[in-house]
Image (cartoon, coloured by chain):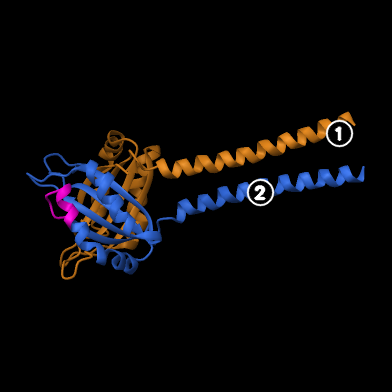
Chain colours: A blue, B orange
C-alpha cells in the first residue's frame, strides 16, 4: 500500500515536471520570437533595377547566399531573400530587383568573417547578376 | 484493486496527453517561425539619406508607424523598423536613413486599406522627415 502510494507520487511529480517543462519551452520560444530581431544588425545587399540588368534568383537562392551564409558561423542569426515586385506607385519604376539580408549579432565579426572571402564572393556575382549592389548596414529598432 | 488500476491508467493517459500536447504546441510554434515570412508581401518605405535631410526616429516609431499599422487589420502579419547606420563601404555614403516595413498577406487588401487613409498618412510625413520615401513592394522568397 505504502509502495503504491510512493509510486503514484513519483508518477505524479514526473508528470507535473514534464508538463511544466513543456510550458517553459513554449514560453521561452515565444520570447525568442518577440526579441529575436530587435537590436540585431542587418546587412542588406540590394540589387537596383535598371533596363538591361538581370538577376538569376534561382542561382542566388541555391548557391550564392548559402555560400556567404556559410562564412558567417554562429554570428548569423538568419538570412532572408526577397524579390522586388513593383514600386507600389503607378508609372514609377521598380527600385530593387532583389535584396538579400543577413541578420547578425556583431558587425565587426561579420566584417572579419567576410574580409578573407571578399574575392570569392565578388567573383560569384557574374554568375547571377550584371548589376553592382547597394549595401545598407542598419540596426533593427523594432 | 481494480479501481486503483483504472485510476492509475487515467492518471497515466492524462499525463501522456498533456505531455504530447505540450510537444505539439512547441512544434507548431517552431513551424510558425520558419514559415511565417516566406510568401508574404513586404511593403518597404525607405527614406534616402542626403545632406540636410532629417528623420525623427522617435516620432516614427511611437506615432507614425503605429497609426499606419492600425489601418491594416488582420492582413498585417508584423511590421519592422530599422535605422540606417552605414553603407558598409569606406567613403560611400549611407543609402537610407531609415526603413519601415509592413509584412502583409495580401497586397490588394493592403492597397484597399491604405487608399482612404493616404492623405492622413502623407500629412504626417512633415512631423518626422523632410525627405520623400522610396517604396518597394517585394515578395519574401526565403
Tell me the SS state at disc 1. Answer: helix
Which residue does the image show at 17% across and 52% down from the upper left?
A125
Q: Is residue A105 left or right of residue A57?
A: right
Residue B43: % across, % down: 27, 45
- CB-based contact (under 8 Å), mark 1 and mark 2: no
Q: Is residue B120 visible?
A: no
Q: Residue A84: say if magenta.
A: no
State the image quarter where residue B18 is shown: top right
Provide the residue designation for mark 2.
A20
Q: Is residue B68 left or right of residue A25?
A: left
- The quarter of the picture where the C terminus of chain B appears is top left
Q: Is residue B132 left or right of residue B65?
A: left
State the image quarter where residue B72 is shown: top left
Q: Is residue A54 visible?
A: yes
Provide the residue designation for mark 1.
B4
User: How many dots with numbers?
Assistant: 2
Residue A84: % across, % down: 21, 43
Q: Which residues are magenta?
A: A123-133
Which residue does the image show at 82% across and 43% down from the upper left?
A8
Amino acid at each position: 500500500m505504502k509502495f503504491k502510494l510512493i509510486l503514484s507520487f513519483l508518477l505524479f511529480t514526473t508528470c507535473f515536471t514534464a508538463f511544466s517543462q513543456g510550458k517553459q519551452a513554449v514560453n521561452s520560444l515565444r520570447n525568442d520570437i518577440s526579441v529575436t530581431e530587435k537590436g540585431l544588425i542587418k546587412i542588406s545587399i540590394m540589387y537596383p533595377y535598371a533596363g538591361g540588368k538581370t538577376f538569376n534568383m534561382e542561382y542566388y537562392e541555391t548557391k550564392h547566399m548559402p555560400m556567404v551564409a556559410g562564412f558567417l558561423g554562429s554570428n548569423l542569426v538568419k538570412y532572408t531573400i526577397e524579390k522586388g515586385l513593383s514600386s507600389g506607385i503607378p508609372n514609377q519604376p521598380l527600385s530593387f530587383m532583389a535584396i538579400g539580408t543577413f541578420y547578425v549579432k556583431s558587425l565587426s565579426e561579420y566584417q572579419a568573417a567576410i574580409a578573407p572571402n571578399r574575392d570569392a564572393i565578388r567573383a560569384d556575382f557574374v554568375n547571377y547578376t550584371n548589376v553592382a549592389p547597394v549595401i545598407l548596414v542598419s540596426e533593427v529598432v523594432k
